[in-house]
Image (tube, grey):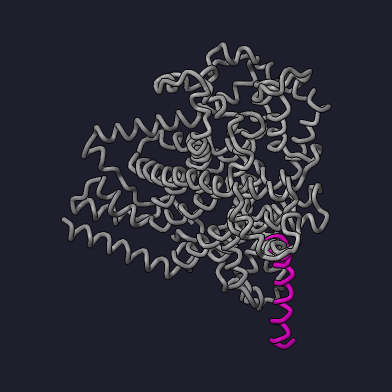
Amino acid sequence: MSKVKKAKQRNTAMWVMLSPYLILLIGLGILPVIMAVLEIPQKARNNREGGWGVVIKVIQDFRLIPAVEHILGFVLIFVPLTIVFVIAMALMLDLNNSKWKKYARVAYIVPASVSGGVAVLVWYIIFEPHFSPFKPFLRLFGIKRSDQIWQTSHLVWIFAIMAFFTIAGNWILIQYGSLQSISGEVIEAARIDGCSAFQIAMRIKLPLIKKYIIYMAVLVFAGGLQLFVEPQLLDTGVFNGISHVWSLDQLSYDFAFTNGEFGSASALSILLLIPSLLGALVVIFKTDMFEDEETAARKERKMAKKALEAMKAGN
Amino acid sequence: MIETQTLKKKSNLKGENPFAMSLVNGWLIIFAVISVVPMIWLVLAPTKTDPQLSSSNPLAVGSLSGYWHAWHHLNFFDDGVVAQWAWNSVWYTAMIVVIATITASLAGFVLSASRIRFKRVFLISTLIFMLVPPMALVVPVFVLMDKLNLTDNPWSVILVSSLYPFGAFLSYIYYSTTIPKELYESARLDGCNDFRLFTKIALPLSTPLLSLLAFFAFIGNWGNYFLPYILLPSPEHYTLPIGLGFLFVSTPALNPGVGATSVPVYKPEIALAGVLVAVPIMLVFMFSQKRLVRGMLAGSIKE
């Protein structure tokens, strides 16, 4: 058999093995996005003539601004809280050499299983002074009745706390893992140069895990925009003070399912997709998270050296 | 891939400032306690009766038979539909884990071992879909499924959830870093075709990868809410998380507006449904911590 023929045959087999994934990727990943874009200008009840004007209608919908405000309020609390807390916890864990550390890590991951409906149930109980396992805590803040907590204006905080506990533990372990990638020699050198533990954390460890922090920030932010389950479930009678379309995903859902306005629903979901997409592109092209090995290793050494030099200059 | 560090970085905070170190340790322990208490409450709740839940200490242990009673009561709800939800959760998730793991491992192998056209395009689109939250695609997917008349069919959820770009990327990294390209070349010279390259060389070395893929597929889908909620409107197709939400609406456990019903579903019963959703995920997480960290940092930490 000629070489060309062999190579061709080889590629056929490779394509056959790739095709199940490729069919899913194209058919259920790329195609739905294209279909959603094409759906926007279709004729619908609220868009009798058809056309792209419906995007303006969505933007001018009186429910959009409140939903944007809610989500922005939520994200502004949830994202910085999560990032700062997670990094601080990971750095503290990194300082600790005790044997019990591994049990603490197991404990941190437990709340990850409390999400969606379970989160609504558990937090309903925690915020109810009658039932709460954190009763003394609530008393400390002067909370004796649950309606002191369940107020419409507190929802951004309530959802931020729920979301924070669902993901914080995972990220603490992941960032603790990223800290383990820092070479011991760098830390040792800094210590010999007289750096305190705090200085090492702030000026060596943090800069060296910067890309993981960006990676986390992008994923946490993109996930935060897509708040649906918790507000939707609170709206089942658990808390009457919540709007039916509290979050943007709920509004998109409402367009499609209550009113059958698929064009508006698609428009809003595509608008929401854009920030996530930009975030993804930033991580892919502006950080070296997914770079090939040699470049990454070279950059890492350079950064470590730079950080160390900066330290020396600082002293 | 991360390996445990050979060079131990000993803390110098202990020597520098023992007081600060004990503050740090104290906080690490306090946060561990805060993390586990809600779960302990949840697991203990079905052992108690509804009045006991408000009268006794929140962390007191009731009677183990409470679990049996709560399950019995839950099964009064809509002629035992809860058992159907549990079974749906099990079989949907199992199918997703199997399909996602197989398609992703094959894709990762091809992307790392072959020189097919558009390889870079596939890799970049995989990365994009991996970083965009799946929730962002739910409404577009619904529009497509509605056109194809596939709503209210469990396979729509199974197939959509089986698209596993994160898994494809993980296996691409795994195969690129564990199997040297020369190995494929020499196998080819010995007359191995590409299918056998996978079954004879890659697959036998894939056990850690497959467990990693199955782990992430499981944790990503067992508790999934938005997609099945939208695609599967009939109660007999619900999964446990959707069913749990349905119980919120239709029983007086958390919703006093419902009033007294003949169905004895109150807080212990709801908590049992919560336990069924949360505990499998919790156990998998606890036993797979290393997989979580290794998977999320794959491709970025090189040894």
Q: With respect to residue B86, does B219 lie above or below? A: below
On whether residue A22 falls in the magenta region, the answer is yes
Q: Quadrant of residue A193?
A: bottom left
Where residue B159 sits, quadrant-wise, is: bottom right
Tell me the residue at 70%/58% (across/down).
A263
Whether residue A265 sits left or right of residue B88 in the image: it is: left
> As displayed, is residue B297 above or below residue A288?
above
Residue A67 location (% of width, % of height): 56, 46
How far across and down, in percent of the image, does residue B139 sit? 68, 53
In the rendered image, the quadrant that contains the C terminus of chain B is bottom left
The answer to whether B190 appears left or right of A226 in the picture is right
Q: Give the residues drawn in magenta, as a range.
A: A1-29
Compared to residue A5, the image places residue A296 above or below, namely above
- Residue at left offset 41%, top offset 58%: A211
Most foreground residue, B216 or A117: A117
Q: Mainly helix, strand or loop, the magenta region?
A: helix
* Residue A306 place in picture, x, y as percent: 27, 64
Residue B94, compared with residue A262, is above or below; it is above
| Residue B79 placement, left or right of A42 | right
Count the numbered circles shown.
Answer: 0
Q: Position of residue A183 (x, y in %)?
A: 34, 56
